Image: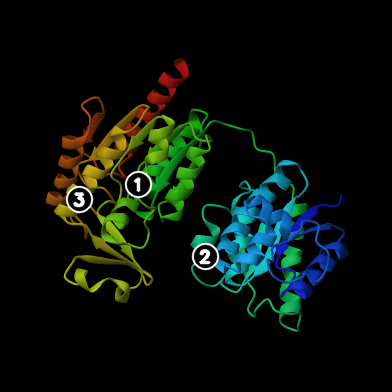
Amino acid sequence: MAKTIAVVGALDTKGADFAFVKAEIERRGHEALVINVSVVGRPAFRPDVSAAQVAKAGGIPLKELQKKADKALAMATMTKGIAVVARRLHDRGRINGVLSMGGGAGTAIGTAAMRALPLGFPKLMVSTVASGDTSAYVGTKDIVMMPSVVDVAGVNRISAPIYANAVGAIVGMVETRPPKIKAKPLLAASMFGNTTPVVTRCVTAMAARGYETLVFHATGTGGKTMESLIDEGLIEGVLDVTTTEWADELCGGVLTAGPTRGDAAARRGIPQVICPGCLDMVNFWAPETVPPKYKDRRFYRWNPNITLMRTTPEENAALGRILAEKANAAKGSVAFFLPLHGVSMLDAPGKDFWWPEANQALFAAIKENLKPSIEVVELDNNINDDAFADAVAAKLLEFLWQRRGR
């Protein structure tokens, strides 16, 4: 059965490129629904959705954008409008996938359409910036970024096979039928390499009770994605075992999830168990990327591209206050579990980041700043000990049972 693939792009300057892609999609037995996002020039061929329709969805008529000749305003309007148009087409069952191509501006607009669509919906962006930092474009969605190698500025011996491969990829995605998986109540857990044992054991324990746990790698993007799914109402409880992204937010590390990390569960009122997992470390890339102000600190080279910096007692005290503040805002059940023998694999007696005074500053700040009604459980374990994992899982199960009984 033929599928319909939305093709998003500027049909004035890149008309030949999109005409090629449209023809390739049709040659593969599917349909292309072309959306024009160019503001100034005339489209090389007639689109299915005009630039005027996109601009209207963005809040400003196309003629007014053309009259103002304000590039920033035009970008903002078309970016807003394409998200509205894409979501509307999806909700009406008009499209089965989306493909876009472009440079910096084209990528910003194309991925705006993709970020408006749900997880699992096929999304492919052919971009001149795909080999760089694409976090601003991808956000928390499953967007496939494909390097265009050359500019999207004509069909030639380099671009033609790349465009054809892009069509092949999106066609493969829209033709794929995901296996049916029995729906179970969803939980979320945060994990790092240094907290893998505790999270793995918790996931196993929750599975035995009929729960499916989505594990998010605490790399900034992971934390943001977890927050977004919680906000969408998909998650029933949170094992926030690895709150390390706050260390990067505080100290300028490279894996921060931003200042709203932890807000979603509190706002939604879902049960959560919080641990100070990996708050002993701040993440930087290769050693030469560490800011000079930190040159005298304690480091651990996790791999050639990741350098970990041990947090200090002062930083840990600040982190404890932040975690307590976030937990105090919770509308649902919440408990803190503190591992007195270390918050990561590296933070254990005899290991590189073992620093009891720093940990005590962290734990004291949490306890001193939490509301009296929030339970704090202190255990003589490392965070990765089986006994610690079992206690954490048991507490979240208790919260979940209580919530279902209400």
Disc 3: which residue:
316
Say which quarter of the image contains residue 256.
Answer: bottom left
Q: Is residue 161 left or right of residue 372?
A: right
Q: Looking at the image, tell me whether mark 2 or mark 3 is earlier in sequence order.
A: 2
Disc 2: which residue:
134
Secondary structure beneath label 3: helix
Three-letter amino acid code of the residue under disc 3: Asn
Q: Nearer the viewer, mark 1 or mark 2?
A: 2
The residue carrying pointer 2 sits among few (fewer than 14), some (14 to 19) or many (20 or more) residues within 10 Å by Cα, namely few
Q: Nearer the viewer, mark 1 or mark 3?
A: 3
Three-letter amino acid code of the residue under disc 2: Thr
Colour basis = rainbow
**382 w.r.t. 373: above or below:** below
Q: Are marks 1 and 2 in contact (CB under 8 Å)?
A: no
At a point 26% along the width and 48% down the height, the residue shown is: 343
Q: CA distance from mark 1 to mark 2?
A: 24 Å
Say which quarter of the image contains residue 379.
Answer: top left
- x and y, in percent, of residue 253 in the image: 32, 62
Q: Is residue 91 left or right of residue 2?
A: left
Secondary structure beneath label 1: loop
* Mark count: 3
- x and y, in percent, of residue 214 in the image: 50, 42
The residue carrying pointer 1 sits among few (fewer than 14), some (14 to 19) or many (20 or more) residues within 10 Å by Cα, namely many
Residue 242: mark in rendering: 1
Q: CA distance from mark 1 to mark 3?
A: 14 Å
> Quick one: quadrant of the C terminus?
top left
- x and y, in percent, of residue 7 in the image: 74, 61
Three-letter amino acid code of the residue under disc 1: Thr
Q: CA distance from mark 2 to mark 3?
A: 31 Å
